[in-house]
Image: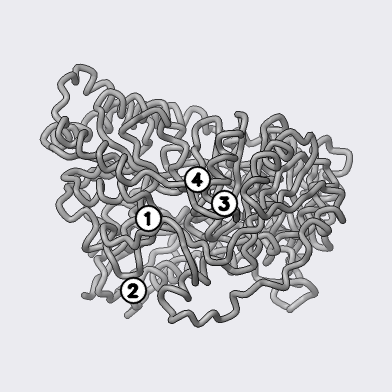
Amino acid sequence: MNGAELVIQILKEKGVNRVFGYPGGAIMPIYDALYESGIEHVLSRHEQGSGFAALGYAKISGKPSVCIATSGPGATNLITALGDANFDSVPMVVITGQVSTEVMGTDAFQEIDMLGLSLAVTKHSFLVEKPEQLESIVHQAFEIAQSGRPGPVLIDLPKNIQLALIEKEDIRSTKSAAIENNQQLCKAVCKKSVADAIALLLDSKKPVFYVGGGVLTAEAETELNQLLDLLQIPAVSTLKGLGSINLDNELYLGMLGMHGNAAANHTVQECDLLVAVGARFDDRVTGKLDGFATNAKVIHFDIDGAELNKIRRADVALEGDLKCYLQVMLEDLSNFKSDPYNDWHSHILDMKKEHAWAYDKPGESIFAPKLLKDLSDKLKTPSIVTTDVGQHQMWTAQHMRFSQKARLITSGGSGTMGFGLPVALGAQFAEPESTVVVVSGDGSFMMNVQELATIKRYSLPIKIVLIDNAKLGMVKQWQQLFFEERYSETDLSDNPDFVVLAKAFDIEAETITQNNQVDAALTKMLNCKKAFLLHVKIEEKDNVWPLVPPGATNEQMMEKIYDEFI
Amino acid sequence: MMNSFNLITANQPAIVERLLRVIRHRGFALHSMQLSSTEQGLEIDFKVESTRAIHLLINQLEKLYDVKQISLN
């Protein structure tokens, strides 16, 4: 077989039955091997769309997804999706075509140094220089993508190697044995090191769990919730951790940080012990770092040792698998009965009540937080919500309620506009029966709008809630608050007619402008068996509150319920 | 603060670029570098300077797939 056929054969052996991508010159042998291979290929309309669709597929399937593109511009178009997956720890194997080895370095047509470009945006990357390396590299790519802290791995594959005759060596993955050994070893290490964490916990009067996306990546939600139930310790979540904490936990305070709930931020600022689980003290979480939870000792669990003591010094730093650590904590604390945190609890419940969200905005215009709360209430599970980046994203994080059956996929570290629509494609392919909703803004939506064609091509029943303030809203909000209302390049009042645009792709669509239209429109959209775009006009003046201004600590939030005027 | 460390890495394409990228990106200035090819791969001595703690760099370099061993001098 040739190199391309070998790659497809290995993908099949690994159980890959669907790949995402876009063909082109230097990757044609792979596309030829895909033809009639039995592997389904999902064609997007831009390589960035393919990359993000693959990201959505990996997030929902829990396995490394595969994305394929050609050399040069095909490869560079994947950079944004690679960077996003790298930042948010998503396992992907990305294969890019490359010009043949004999012309590499001669500025051949569609040649670009993709290995060089990949260094900052991948967990690891390979250039296949010789045919005999290919089989081993494909296996390594899958193992690296899903081991430890997951991430994207690039294989840059020259065309002549795709065409070279190669004898398959049948390299067997030793991964399962390695994982088993690793788990036993991990448990022993956890047992020993967790004692210091438990001592700190038992010594604290005002502890808080600060939960990040690592819990979902480690599939440790069950253990986390059992531990929270057992210890009755309040918990806050990062943007990426939303969905991991049981919603019926009355000591769960929602998201913390720049646009977090005030009760969550005050709780963290007042705590004497912060238990960080799979979270990395991002600047959007901490606000001014030297004013963040200043009286707290820190226990930090993370699978990535480089995150420990990176931003905030931990009193107890525990590197390893979160599931394993939380299991050991549960075992070692199984006799924990007393409730030493009573005063702390009542104070927190008071704050939670005081800072509960308000939805009774006067007037007839649509209030996006209320619309998103209503959408969340109406959404039947299993469901998946994807977002773009900006005001609508923060409103979604604040006002929709996520769980293990109502999942959120959002661009956290990278903050990529144009993320929501293509990620939803991958999520819908991974779970055809689930309701998939994209919550987008009028700025972000136009960044990968070409993927409406992919919805049409595959008849995907994706629902799009397009929240339109005819602005780059989050940038406008900052211009209003911190740049003396100098609205530089944030006006989008010349947006296209989004309903006509959707209909051009055979997607049903309607516009609503008044709050009395919301209920019927959401019901109609969710009951629609096909794709649907709900275009929601909101007032330009509506901003995201609360907001921790730049350079401020988290208790110095600017709080406002509604914006009366600009 | 100046720090020296020694690395043993697999001899793979782009390994030196990978190391230099991480050193620069994580806020360290390169003062000297000596590289030799051995049977194990590459052995590289670095001297770097930064106001940041050296463990922040070592922890990031350790994550690179091709890095086999790091020792701080």
- Of the numbered discs in the image, which one, if any, rests on residue A150? 4
Q: Residue at x 21, y 35 (%)?
A: A193
First in sequence: mark 1 vs mark 2: 2
**Residue A10 in sight here:** no
Instruction: Sort mark 3 into few (<14), some (14-19) or many (20+) by Cα contacts within 10 Å.
Output: many
Q: CA distance from mark 1 to mark 2?
A: 16 Å
**Residue A438 in sight here:** yes
Q: CA distance from mark 4 to mark 1?
A: 16 Å
**Amino acid of disc 4:** Pro
Is there one chain holding both mark 4 and mark 2? no
Q: Which residue is mark 1?
A: B62
- Callout 1: residue from which chain? B
Viewer-closest of A366 and A107: A366
Q: CA distance from mark 2 to mark 3?
A: 25 Å
Instruction: Sort mark 2 into few (<14), some (14-19) or many (20+) by Cα contacts within 10 Å.
Output: many
Q: Residue at x 71, y 54 (%)?
A: A535
Kindly check if marks 2 and 3 are in contact, taking CB atoms under 8 A apart as contact.
no
Q: Which residue is mark 2?
A: B28
- Callout 2: residue from which chain? B
Q: CA distance from mark 1 to mark 3?
A: 18 Å
- Callout 4: residue from which chain? A
**Amino acid of disc 3:** Pro
Instruction: Sort mark 4 into few (<14), some (14-19) or many (20+) by Cα contacts within 10 Å.
Output: many
Tell me the mark number nearer the camera, choosing from 1 and 3.
3
| SS at mark 4 in the image | loop
Q: Where is residue B57 shown, x and y percent of the image?
A: 33, 63
- Callout 3: residue from which chain? A
**Amino acid of disc 1:** Glu
Q: Is residue A26 left or right of residue B45?
A: right
Q: Which residue is mark 3?
A: A152
| SS at mark 3 in the image | strand
Q: Residue at x 44, y 80 (%)?
A: A483
